[in-house]
């Protein structure tokens, strides 16, 4: 049996041609329809976790000469987006009530890979323009001040981060009579130098900022090892870590973590040195403990 022939097509050759034209038209229509469906507008709805926020180098406030990135643990800052609504929840401090902010927005432009929204402002009525672009499975929000990365909300990651925070908020260990050392970023860490930092922020002389490094280098040269930035009081005594006397752990190439769970002990202060002890604990099993002498003499050109 010849399946390519039929009584109708043989009897009506024009119908065969019309049928061919109809088939081509159907294929074209289907292709156009599928193309339109495939080019759906970017969907930003759902619950997202902020992973990092960076100051916009093109910000109107003029901070064009420095890039500062804050990394945020899973669940510390979440954004839930609905149709025209945005709810931001800040939950950085364990045990404290989350800070919740609700805003509305309207779409200014929307494509398959990006969107522009306008978030009204209660202060000036002009609002904030936010550009949103795809970043793999996540999104990047860019406004006139910050560049913020988000990923889909992950309850497992949030639970793990919460456990890490609870661990980090356990009391720091007792200060040991040993040379300063620690466990940072999953590795044993032993500093070899502690000296006055080139950046000093206390004009009253109540504290001196020092850099504690695990390698000898020029001050502005990059390091492959974690380092500490410590604000040392200039009077002997015992000082709980706080916003006034803080400890910042720097992880190359651009991540900083501030530890405020611990104690600084100042033993002796001279014009050129400070003998101190430090014990501190942070997230991800970051631990510092021991004693060291800081060189706080005036800086020399390098």
Image: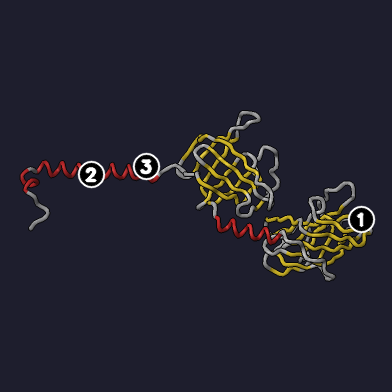
- Which residue in the protein does label 2 denote? 24
Q: Position of residue 42 (x, y in %)?
A: 47, 43
| Mark toward the viewer: 1 or 3 | 1
32 lies above or below 76? above
Could you tell me how far apart the alpha carbons at marks 1 and 2 are, in whole angstroms?
88 Å
Q: Residues within 10 Å of mark 2 (few under 14, many from 20)?
A: few
Q: Residue at x 75, y 57 (%)?
A: 259
Q: Nearer the viewer, residue 190 or 9?
A: 190
Q: Residues within 10 Å of mark 1 (few under 14, many from 20)?
A: some
Q: Residues within 10 Å of mark 3 (few under 14, many from 20)?
A: few
Q: Residue at x 72, y 70 (%)?
A: 188
The mark nearer the N terminus, 1 or 2, is 2
Could you tell me how far apart the alpha carbons at marks 2 and 3 are, in whole angstroms?
19 Å
Residue 188 appears left or right of 131: right
Residue 239 appears left or right of 36: right
Asked which secondary structure carries label 2, the reply is: helix
- Which residue in the protein does label 1 denote? 235
Q: Residue at x 70, y 47 (%)?
A: 66
Q: Residue at x 28, y 43 (%)?
A: 28
144 lies above or below 267? above
Q: Position of residue 218 (x, y in %)?
A: 78, 60
Q: Position of residue 27 (x, y in %)?
A: 26, 45
User: Residue furthest toward the right?
Assistant: 270
| Mark toward the viewer: 1 or 2 | 1
Q: Position of residue 63 (x, y in %)?
A: 70, 42
Asked which secondary structure carries label 1, the reply is: loop
The mark nearer the N terminus, 1 or 3, is 3
| Mark toward the viewer: 2 or 3 | 3
Could you tell me how far apart the alpha carbons at marks 1 and 3 are, in whole angstroms?
71 Å
Q: Mark 2 and mark 3 in contact? Answer it, CB < 8 Å.
A: no
Q: Mark 1 and mark 3 in contact? Answer it, CB < 8 Å.
A: no
- Which residue in the protein does label 3 denote? 36
């Amino acid at each position: 049996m010849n399946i390519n022939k039929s009584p109708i097509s043989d009897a009506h050759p024009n119908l065969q041609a019309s049928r061919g034209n109809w088939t081509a038209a159907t294929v074209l229509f289907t292709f156009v329809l599928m193309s339109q469906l495939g080019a759906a507008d970017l969907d930003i709805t759902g619950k997202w976790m902020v992973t990092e926020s960076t100051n916009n180098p093109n910000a109107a406030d003029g901070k064009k000469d420095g890039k500062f990135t804050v990394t945020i643990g899973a669940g510390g800052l979440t954004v839930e987006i609905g149709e025209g609504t945005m709810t931001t929840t800040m939950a950085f401090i364990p045990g404290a009530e989350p800070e919740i902010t609700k805003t509305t927005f309207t779409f200014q432009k929307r494509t398959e890979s990006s969107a522009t929204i306008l978030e009204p402002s209660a202060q000036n009525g002009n609002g904030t323009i936010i550009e949103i672009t795809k970043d793999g499975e996540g999104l990047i929000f860019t406004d006139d001040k910050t560049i913020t990365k988000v990923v889909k909300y992950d309850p497992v990651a949030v639970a793990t981060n919460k456990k890490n925070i609870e661990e980090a908020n356990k009391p720091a260990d007792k200060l040991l009579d040993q040379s300063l050392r620690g466990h940072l970023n999953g590795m044993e860490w032993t500093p070899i130098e502690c000296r006055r930092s080139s950046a000093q922020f206390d004009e009253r002389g109540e504290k001196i900022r020092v850099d504690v490094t695990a390698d000898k280098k020029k001050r502005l040269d990059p390091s492959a090892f974690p380092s500490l930035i410590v604000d040392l009081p200039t009077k002997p005594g015992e000082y709980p870590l706080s916003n006034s006397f803080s400890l910042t752990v720097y992880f190359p190439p651009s991540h900083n973590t501030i530890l405020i769970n611990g104690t600084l002990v100042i033993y002796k202060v001279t014009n050129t040195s400070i003998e101190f002890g430090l014990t501190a604990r942070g997230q991800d099993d970051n631990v510092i403990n021991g004693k060291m002498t800081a060189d706080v003499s005036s800086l020399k050109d390098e």
